[in-house]
Amino acid sequence: MMNIEREKIGALGELLATPKKIVIVGHTNPDGDAIGSSLALAEVLRSRGHEVLCALPNNYPYYLRWIPCSGDLVIYRNDEEHRTDAAIEKADIIVCADMNALTRADALGEAVAKNTTAKRVLIDHHLQPSEGFDVAFSYPESSSTAFLMYTIIVALFGKEAITATVATQLYVGIMTDTGNFAFSNLTPELFECVAALSATGIDIPTIYNNVYNSFTEGRAKLFGYAIHRKMKTLLGGRVAYMSLTEEEMRRFWFQQGDNEGFVNYPLTIKKMKMSAMFTAQTGFIRVSLRSRGDVDVDTFARRYFNGGGHKNAAGGKSFVSMEETIAHYIKAVKEYHEEGNV
Ligand code: 5GP
Ligand code: MN
């Protein structure tokens, strides 16, 4: 049950009482939830007379490019006209969506940190929100930021604000962050929200197909390769890991987002408790972690990979070679196991 304090809604309502210049910021490697919740808020605020710019640190996967209004997203890394910097400088309000700290937005977060006059609003469901927000909606019990965003939009503007466009954007966030309604925190209130989204006439099977059945042939082959050739197990088959080097990714015509979700697959094995995916990026290795039940990968990611996230889905970064990263992981798993955590 998500109980949003009325004072917070009141405080945000007050900030939005007159037309404002607003920048909405999402996290690096934006996912369906970051994009869906940001675009939905932008749509609602624009229709109420606010000037809104939605910015992301880097580009998002090709299979999310159909989302209504996604063409309005400004990618900070490619923003040669410096539209984002100009908007941040002039902003009355900066909203951070689907991230618990500005550091999750890398250079874009640094640009936001320089503006000391705008009011800062946090709308997020990750653990351990950072300080420094004027209004913070931090609800780790929410299965997605999109569901939290729905609750906030309805509290501020009523259900009429949920148009079919907004509903489509929010549904993408809810569907992707719950693994199409398979993960934790599937509350009656979430399904009431989905009922309201569905009532706007959105096409749920099409949304599903647009996201989950829209990959390239290369992605299907890379997935097969990763599972067949790269999945290794530890602790008698209860912990798994996979890795992809730049060369392997090139071999399968890798496009950004192609490895999304791979890390979940080892958890289809009944006795599997924890899974890791190491993906080479320029200058570092991206670490993705997933777990089942009591195994806490948020703590694991904080302790061993400078990251965090949720109890059963977290991530981080490694700045050593792939071999060293894997050796570090194996050692960390052993330590975690000896402490009774996995
Ligand atoms: P994914 O594995 O899908 O990249 O991320 C899973 C979860 O961990 C997401 O909720 C994401 O926000 C969080 N996460 C991923 N990478 C990082 C990171 O480098 N730092 C922190 N704090 N969280 C991360
Ligand atoms: Mn999310």
Image (spheres, grey):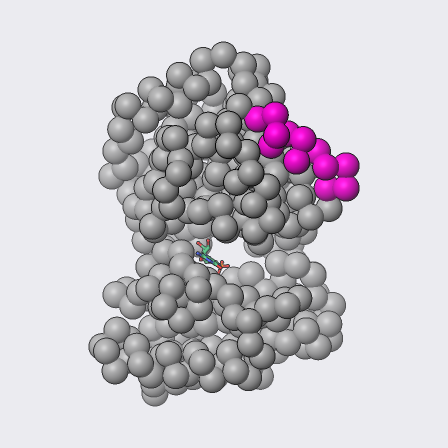
Residue sitting farthest toward the top: 18
Q: Residue at x 29, y 68 (%)?
A: 295
- 220 vs 127, left or right, is right
Disc count in the image? 0
Where does the image place residue 128, in percent across and percent down from the top left? 34, 50
Where does the image place residue 123, in percent across and percent down from the top left? 42, 37
Where does the image place residue 47, in percent across and percent down from the top left? 56, 18
- 154 vs 37, left or right, is left
For the question of whether residue 335 can be seen, the reply is: yes
Q: Residue at x 58, y 79 (%)?
A: 321
- 55 vs 128, left or right, is right
The quadrant of the rendering that contains the C terminus is bottom left
Where does the image place residue 135, in percent across and percent down from the top left? 37, 30
- Work out whether 19 lies above or below 298: above
Residue sitting farthest toward the right: 80
Q: Residue at x 57, y 31 (%)?
A: 23
Say if the magenta span includes residue 6.
Answer: no
Residue sitting farthest toward the bottom: 236
Secondary structure, magenta segment, majority class = helix
For the question of whether residue 143 can be seen, the reply is: no
Say if the magenta span includes residue 82.
Answer: yes
Q: Residue at x 29, y 31 (%)?
A: 4
The quadrant of the rendering that contains the N terminus is top left
Q: Which stretch appears magenta?
A: 79-91
- Work out whether 186 lies above or below 300: above
